[in-house]
Structures are given as structure tokens and as C-alpha cells.
Image (spheres, grey):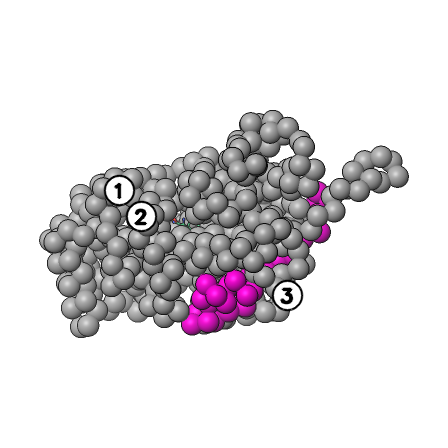
Amino acid sequence: MSAQADGAMIATEAISLVNCCLPPPVRMTCGAPQASLYLAAALSRAGREVSVYDTAMDFRPETFTADALYDYLSAIPSRVLGLSLWDSVLPRALAATRRLKEEQPDRVLILGGPSASALGANIMRLFPWVDCLVVGEGETSLPLLLSFVESGNLSLDLLPETVFIRSNGQIAQGAGKAVRLLSEQIPLPDYSKIDRGRYKRLEVVTSRGCPRRCSYCSVNVATGELMRQRPLSDLFDEIAGLIGGDEDCIHILDDNFTIDRPRLHTFCEGFRDRFPRNSWSCYARLGDLDPATTDLMTTSRCCGIYTGVESVDRATLTSVGKATPAVDPYLQINEIAKSMNVTASFIWGLPEETMDALHSTLHFIDKLLDIEHVFVNLFQISPLSGTRLTHSMRDRLAFNEDCISGFVFPPFYAPLSEEEISLIRQYPIIFSAFYHDPSDLFLKKQSTIRTFLGN
Ligand code: B12
Ligand code: SF4
């Protein structure tokens, strides 16, 4: 810290935010690192110097190894690093940061993002080279944490309870109340921190939180069940800043963009008026899309939806807390695909899924693939960290490199190193996403899927 003329202290310790994301196979599909840009906006507002690094853009899938990540992190000049972590990258990031702290012990490592939020203090407890960790939204807590790190003598009451910090070999937790941002407090992401021209895919996030509780999903672990929707005026300003030409399409990343029908309708009308030549896409729940809504989305140039169907079996869906569709999903997808692309996503391997249920889903997928403009994703269930599903499977998780879900670790990535495998084996509950249910039923399903994909 240094003193200003008026006696106030200004922040001096710079921070580098690293979006620690597996690089996509095609760079064109890489969107800007949203979390880092939101955090950068909050940090700049708090007077912090902040830089953003993005492994998704700076690596190729086959070059992104723990050693390469170590080299990358060790070349970043600022002492303090804030890493955004997903389950997919957790073993790699922990292997790389262990080496980083061994070689450069004065580094300060702060972890955040979906995995850090789901695993919280367990990460601090098991991996002593991690200095600090933030659960959930970082806009409020990260500036406070940095001031804490910088001064070293502030009270824990000044840190929210969502912050963990290592101090004299002990793990201390903030003692202050954690407050989630209200809708209008969510800042505009600070795009000045990245080279915009490198990112060809334009993405925005319009809300936080999800009120639904699907047992396999970890969204509300990080952002909570209370949904907060950014004001549409802010959103349209952000979109206006992103759009460079008539061809540009805006991809809305919210899991639940269609949940609030009146807001969706207002968005459609606003988008059509303000960006009449551009298009957009979003994630959508089929149950939210009545014919009038689909029509309105089409006229406002929605060019595609991504929808999680997961299974066509009612009992399987009920077992994971997912509401079953009121309308036949085949008829609905068939109808929607007349005016836009539909990507339907399915999960196989849920514990309650029977062989009959799996066969019905595969039969359904076969039928869908005959419809024009319909695309299908089919993933093995991955027990993501901190989810209710993982908790229910905790006594029967098994690890085998041949059975890792392609959802978290597709086969085109640089293979797991021995160190990563050993970490995964040692801590099932941390690296649960790499595990599977070792039952005979699972193996039978796996063989059925291999035959299906082979066909
Ligand atoms: C966009 C997105 C992606 C993009 C990422 C693009 C990019 N360049 O970053 C792509 C398509 C690549 C992707 C891939 C995957 N994703 Co994804 N993705 C999302 C999605 C839809 C939005 C994420 C987002 O930008 N949110 C908005 C930002 C502002 O929120 P946030 O990331 O949570 O960040 C806040 C806090 O977490 C915290 N924070 C974040 N980073 C940091 C860092 C520090 C230092 C601090 C202090 C705080 C902090 O502060 C932020 C601001 O409040 C979410 C769902 C969701 N609604 O969040 C899923 C989600 C994050 N993805 C998920 C998963 C499982 C994956 C994959 C593993 C699997 C897959 N095939 O989709 C891969 C692996 C990616 C990887 N990193 O290696 C899970 C996370 C589970 C987990 N624990 O890992 C989510 C929650 C979806 C779900 N249904 O469960 N994903
Ligand atoms: S799967 Fe979608 S609807 Fe279900 S909890 Fe996750 S984000 Fe919400």
C-alpha cells in the first residue's frame, strides 16, 4: 500500500488473473474469459493494477500440459496470481502450482471459480501450496482479500466467510458476512484487459444463479440458487461494444436464459430493434419454449439453442431432480428446428438409468439425427465436484483412465501425467469428475455406447 496526499491508501500490489481453461480444439470457438473480465472490472474499480491471461487462447489442446502450465505461470511477472479453475483442469493446475510454489515460494496463489467454489477449504487443507481460496463470486471478496494479503494485519472480520487464507501454517476463514451482488451491482466485464481481436466468438452472461437443483450440476454451488439478472440496458451496451459487423452472432452463456419469459420477450424485442442485422443463440430449456416464444425468438434472429435433454426416461430424469417435459421433446425439437439450429445434449451413465432407459434414449437420438438443423451431444456422466450426485456416489467412485468422461477430459488433450494420475487416485472427492461408477451396469452401458457410436 502507499499513501495518497489526502491520507487515503491506494492499492499497489498488482494481480494477474489466469483463466485456467483447457484450450478448445478449434481456436475460433474460444470465447473471452468471462470470470476474469468481471473480476478485472471490480479490481480496477478498487484501484488495482490487473492483467488477464487465458490458457484457452494461449495453448493448443496437445501442448497444454502441467509442465507447460508451470512455465506459463512462472513467466507471469506479478507476484499475486488469481486462478479460475474448473474440474477438468484441476489435477493439471495443482501439479503446476505445486512446482511453482516450490521454485518461487514468494508467489501468492489465490484460487477461485467453479472447482474452488465446490471444494472450498478441502483444497486448502490437502494442498498446502495454495495460499488463498475464494468460494463463489469474486467481485467483492477478491479486492478485500488483496488488501488483506498486502497489509497482513487486518482483522478477519473484514473478510467475507467465503474467503480462506493460510496464515502461519493454519487455515483461517473470513469472519464477515458474504454478500452476493445484486443484479444492478454486477459490473460490465472489462474487455480492455484482453486483445479482443483474438476472440472470434462473442459471448455474454446475462444472469447469475439457478433456482433449479439438478443433482449432477454445480452451477448453483458457485453462484447460488437466487437468480440475479443483469439489467438489459447494461447487456445491450455490452453487446454494442462487442459487435463488429453484421455477421456477428452473440452467444448467451446463461444456463437459464429462457426461464423468465417476460424478460426473454423484452430481450427479443430490444435485440431486434437495436441489432437488426445480427443474430444470437442461447441455452434453453424446452419446457420454457411455447410456440409464441419460439416465434418471437426467431423474428429477433435467434439462430440456435442448446438444450439439455439428458435422457428420455422419466424415472431417470426424476432421479436427478430434472423436471420432465410436458410436451413430447421429439415433436418440440422438430418444430423448433424449422426456424433455428438445435443442439440437444444427453447424458448416459446416471446411476438410476436402466439399460432399457439407455436404449430408449439412444433410439430417440437416432430419430433426432434425421431432423435437419439438429445436432446431438452425448456425454458420459461426470461426477462433478461438490454436486449432490457425487455425494450420493462417494462410496463407489472408481478411477480408470479408460473410463474418464469425455465431458471433462476429451481424448484430444495431452494425456494425464503420472503426477496428475497419482493426485487423482489419492483424492477421489477432489477429482471426482475423473471417476465413474464401477458397477457391471455401467460397463454394460459403456459397451452399448461404444457400439452405438461405432455405428
Ligand atoms: C462459458 C462456460 C464454459 C466455457 C468457458 C469459456 C472460457 N473461455 O472461459 C467452455 C465452453 C470452454 C466451458 C467448458 C467447460 N465447462 Co463450462 N461453463 C461455462 C458456463 C456456461 C458459464 C461460465 C461463466 O463464464 N460464468 C460467468 C462467470 C462470471 O461466473 P464464474 O465463472 O462462476 O466466475 C465467478 C466466480 O466463480 C468467481 N471466480 C471465478 N474465477 C475466479 C478466480 C479467482 C481468483 C477468484 C477469487 C474468483 C473467481 O468470481 C467470478 C465472478 O463472480 C458455466 C455455467 C455457469 N452459469 O456458470 C459452465 C460451467 C462453469 N462449466 C462447467 C463444466 C463442467 C465445464 C467443462 C468441465 C465440461 C464441458 N464440456 O462443458 C468444460 C471444461 C472447461 C475448462 N476450463 O477446462 C461446470 C463447472 C463444473 C466444475 N466444477 O468444473 C459449469 C458450472 C456448468 C455446470 N452445469 O455444471 N465452459
Ligand atoms: S442443469 Fe441447468 S437447470 Fe439444472 S441446476 Fe444446472 S444450470 Fe440449473
Of residues 404 and 190, the one drawn nearer to the viewer in this rendering: 404
Q: Which residue is mark 3?
A: 195
Q: Which numbered mark, 3 or 1, is in the foreground of this view?
A: 1
Residues in magenta, as a range: 45-72
Secondary structure type for disc 3: loop
Secondary structure type for disc 1: helix
From what the image shows, is residue 195 above or below residue 179? below
CA gap between label 2 and label 3 equals: 38 Å
CA gap between label 3 and label 1 equals: 42 Å
Looking at the image, is mark 1 or mark 2 earlier in the sequence?
A: 1
Percent x, y of residue 291: 35, 51
Percent x, y of residue 336: 34, 58
Check mark 3 vs ligand 1: CB closer than 8 Å? yes or no. Answer: no
Task: Check disc 2: other Cα within 10 Å, few if <14, some if 14-19, many if 20+.
Answer: some
Residue drawn at x 57%, y 36% as measured from the top left? 168
Q: Which residue is mark 1?
A: 394
Residue 269 appears left or right of 372: right
Q: Which residue is mark 2?
A: 428
Residue 55 appears left or right of 334: right
Residue drawn at x 25%, y 39% as measured from the top left? 392
Residue drawn at x 13%, y 53% as measured from the top left? 441
| Label annotation for residue 338 | none
CA gap between label 1 and label 2 equals: 8 Å
Of residues 277 and 137, the one drawn nearer to the viewer in this rendering: 137
